[in-house]
Amino acid sequence: MDLTRSMLNMAMGGGTWVLWLLIVLSVISVIIMVEKALTFYRLRFRDEQFIRDLRPALEDKDWPQAVSWCESCQAPEPQILLAGLQQVEHGKDSASEAMEAERIRVGLQLSRGLNFLGTLGANAPFIGLFGTVLGIIHAFKDLALEEGGGGPAVMAGIAEALVATAVGLLVAIPAVVMYNYFHNRLHQILERSQRLGRLLLASLSSTQNSAARPVELPKIGVRR
């Protein structure tokens, strides 16, 4: 009973503080969205053009030229490939492991802040609903204390309480949309980097096959 009375006293303040909480969360989400949008725009990458320029160097095993191409581009995909090129002298497995390690590092770096957007998009409606429930409790408490009924005043209080749900949805929808967009961009970056890595590994495989190919000795005829 004491717990119920304590919760009721807390609800007497209404859902105003919930609105302020949603506003603060919305400001944080906007900051993350802007920062991520600028980051992905700055790291945009034309993979087809890059591959056309890089392929001759890979086919000719011209590793210094391939390194030069990667160093001239600041996008994550060439930098992941660069990690593999720096290990080509140690073999195919070393190059593959180096690229995988760099790919993980890039993924962790670019995904920073996305969990906040996803969590906010999933929970902001519930936060708004919580504010609405508090507002309705406050409105019905005013109705119980109003001697003349106070129906219009209570309806106004309920209408104000529903604003919290609307604000929660307003905060959640952009967060979900941008989370999905940024997550898709990150997925594309990692897939393109894996494509470049496979091209390098294919080139290294052809090198190893050529080195392992047995030398055919000329047949010497036996005189009878």
Image (spheres, rainbow, N blue to C red):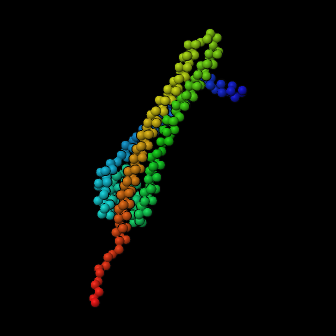
Q: Residue furthest front?
A: 224
Horizontal side, residue 144 vs residue 31: left or right: right
- The one nearer the camera, 27 or 174, is 174
Residue furthest out toward the right: 1
**Residue sitting at x 39%, y 66%:** 89
| Residue 172 picture location, percent across and down | 48, 33
As drawn, 180 above or below 55:
above
Count of labels in the image: 0
Q: Is residue 10 left or right of residue 152?
A: right
Q: Quadrant of the C terminus?
A: bottom left
Tell me which residue sits at (34%, 52%) in the image: 73
* Viewer-closest of 122 and 39: 122
Image quarter hosting the N terminus: top right
Q: Which of the 4 image quadrants contains residue 2?
A: top right
On screen, residue 73 above or below 207: above
Give the quarter of the image for residue 60: bottom left
